[in-house]
């Protein structure tokens, strides 16, 4: 019997079941490793093209996505939902490295191709086994570096929050299907300071204005809107 989903995998593409990228990484890692061990650069090229198709045409053209959401998720149930942008960057990096590995091999540089394929295999299998996704962490680091820019998060206009601020206030940029957002909300519920939530699905204008590159983004602001602390990411 299929488990109930809170996010449609084909329409709610701004979030993703956290187990789906790990399944994808396992497949990518195995294929990349097979290319290294067997000396078959065609495996890198095919896997890279498959990642590229999913990135450009959508999840329905991503074989690992179709396999996970039609065969695995209905049996295991929906896992925790997360922002889909970090794993998307990881897929972009994987596609670039795999296509580069195949091209290097066929251009007469098999050592370069093998090294690139081995890098993908190692990082993808690490992500599948441990959950540590290098591409995702690079995305989050970039989001954090952009977010701490004074032009981005130095101050939140109180008028944008729809209410005057008194004392310290927590501001969370959230998404209705974000599991980690709910975790933060439970954590902040025990704090004496109020929490104001900004739904990036309903207010994409504010997400663009303040450069929100990942959810949840949680800030502590003073009564004039000045950001005094950044809690997440």
Image: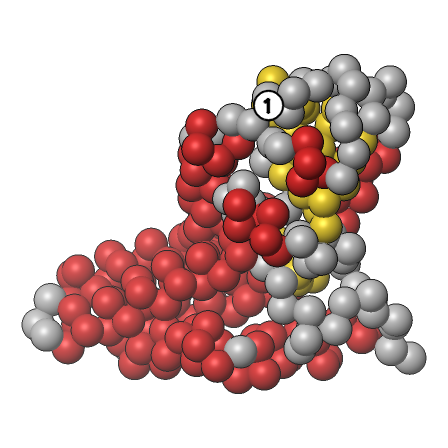
Is residue 25 visible in the rendered image? The answer is yes
As drawn, the residue found furthest toward the left would be 108
Where, by quadrant of the figure, is residue 161 drawn?
top right
As drawn, the residue found furthest toward the right would be 1
Front in this rendered view, residue 3 or 222: 222
Residue at 78% over, 19% down: 166
> How far across and down, in percent of the image, does residue 89 sit?
45, 57
Residue at 24% over, 73% down: 102
Q: As displayed, is residue 221 above or below residue 30?
A: above
Quarter of the figure with the C terminus: top right
Q: Is residue 123 left or right of residue 68?
A: left
Front in this rendered view, residue 56 or 99: 56
Q: Determine which residue is flagged by label 1.
A: 227
Is residue 26 visible in the rendered image? The answer is no
Q: Residues within 10 Å of mark 1 (few under 14, many from 20)?
A: many
> How far across and down, in percent of the image, does residue 22 sit?
59, 59
> How far across and down, in percent of the image, does residue 192 sit?
87, 18
Quarter of the figure with the N terminus: bottom right
Residue at 37% over, 59% down: 93
Q: As displayed, is residue 58 above or below residue 96?
A: below
Which structural element holds mark 1? strand
> How far across and down, in percent of the image, does residue 15 sit?
66, 61
Q: How many marks?
A: 1
Q: As displayed, is residue 52 above or below residue 78?
A: below
As drawn, the residue found furthest toward the bottom would be 61
Where, by quadrant of the figure, is residue 181 drawn?
top right
Where, by quadrant of the figure, is residue 142 drawn?
top left
Residue at 87% over, 78% down: 2
Front in this rendered view, residue 3 or 14: 14
As drawn, the residue found furthest toward the top would be 167
């Amino acid at each position: 019997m299929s488990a109930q989903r809170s996010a449609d995998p084909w329409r709610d593409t701004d979030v993703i079941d956290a187990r789906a990228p790990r399944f994808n990484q396992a497949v990518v890692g195995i294929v990349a490793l097979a290319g290294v061990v067997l000396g078959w650069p065609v495996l890198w090229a095919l896997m890279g093209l498959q990642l590229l198709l999913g990135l450009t045409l959508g999840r329905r053209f991503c074989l690992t996505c179709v396999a996970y959401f039609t065969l695995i998720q209905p049996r295991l149930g929906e896992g925790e939902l997360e922002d889909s942008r970090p794993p998307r960057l990881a897929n972009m990096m994987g596609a670039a490295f795999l296509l580069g590995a195949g091209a290097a091999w066929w251009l007469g540089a098999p050592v370069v191709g093998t090294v690139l394929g081995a890098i993908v295999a190692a990082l993808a299998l690490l992500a599948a086994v441990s959950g540590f996704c290098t591409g995702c962490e690079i995305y989050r680091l970039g989001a954090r570096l952009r977010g701490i820019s004074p032009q981005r998060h130095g101050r939140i206009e109180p008028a944008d929050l729809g209410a005057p601020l008194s004392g310290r206030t927590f501001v969370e940029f959230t998404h209705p299907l974000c599991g980690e957002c709910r975790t933060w909300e439970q954590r902040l519920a025990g704090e004496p300071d109020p929490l104001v939530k900004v739904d990036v699905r309903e207010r994409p204008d504010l997400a663009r204005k303040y450069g929100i590159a990942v959810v949840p983004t949680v800030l502590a602001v003073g009564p004039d809107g000045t950001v005094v602390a950044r809690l997440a990411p």
